[in-house]
Image: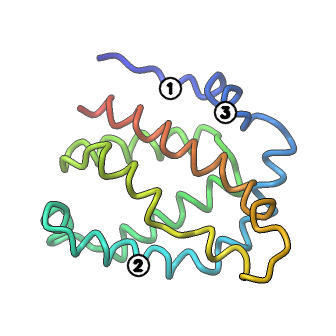
Amino acid sequence: MTFTLDLTARAAYLRLATPSTAADMRRIWPLIETPLDAILDRFYRHIGAQPELAPMLKGRDIGRIKNAQFEHWKGIFLNGFDRDYETRVTRIGIAHAKIGLGPRWFFGAYCLTRAADSLFSRTSPSPARRCHPANPGISAGGVYGHGRYLCGV
């Protein structure tokens, strides 16, 4: 199977290629940055508790993996969907394919982060409006990651 990322076309389709989206993503990063380490800790504990996934983590440096994932998300929110992003997503997709981590697992992971809980308190008047700028980055991660996974298979 041949897959072309065509970053420009996909960014336009997902409405990521607008100045307002880029500004919104940069603006929301400080809200995500602080809780992200704890979110990743919970995420990898959950993965480690899954019988089908735990062997994929055995012998791996989880701290290094977490740091790479943190830097990846930081790059998305601060720099958008540039060539560095494309390079990272390609590397991630190929790594997932090598270890046999298929789409059913990494798409499901987007439901596990609970990042939105960290972006607002229960008393926030408009949690949906505060979370909205994170949606493009999270959605694009799934779209691009799946495409690059297919390249690595």
Identify which amino acid the numbered label 3 is placed on: Leu
Task: Name the residue at 59% across, 28% down.
Answer: 7
Q: CA distance from mark 2 to mark 1?
A: 31 Å
Task: Name the residue at 28% across, 34% down.
Answer: 152
Mark carried by residue 107: none
For residue 10, side relative to residue 28 (left or right)? left
Q: CA distance from mark 1 to mark 3?
A: 13 Å
Q: Of helix, strand and loop, which one carries label 1? A: loop
Looking at the image, is 149 positioned above or below residue 119? above
Give the number of callouts: 3
Identify which amino acid the numbered label 1 is placed on: Leu
**C-beta proximity under 8 Å, tags 1 and 3:** no
Of tags 1 and 3, the one toward the viewer is: 3
Closer to the camera, 87 or 125? 125
Q: In which quarter of the view is residue 126 placed?
A: bottom right
Q: Which mark is first along the chain, 3 or 1?
A: 1
**C-beta proximity under 8 Å, tags 3 and 2:** no
Identify which amino acid the numbered label 2 is placed on: Arg
- Which residue is label 2 attached to? 42
Q: Of helix, strand and loop, which one carries label 2? A: helix
- Which residue is label 1 attached to? 5
Of tags 2 and 1, the one toward the viewer is: 2
10 Å crowding of disc 3: few (<14), some (14-19), many (20+): some
- Which residue is label 3 attached to? 14
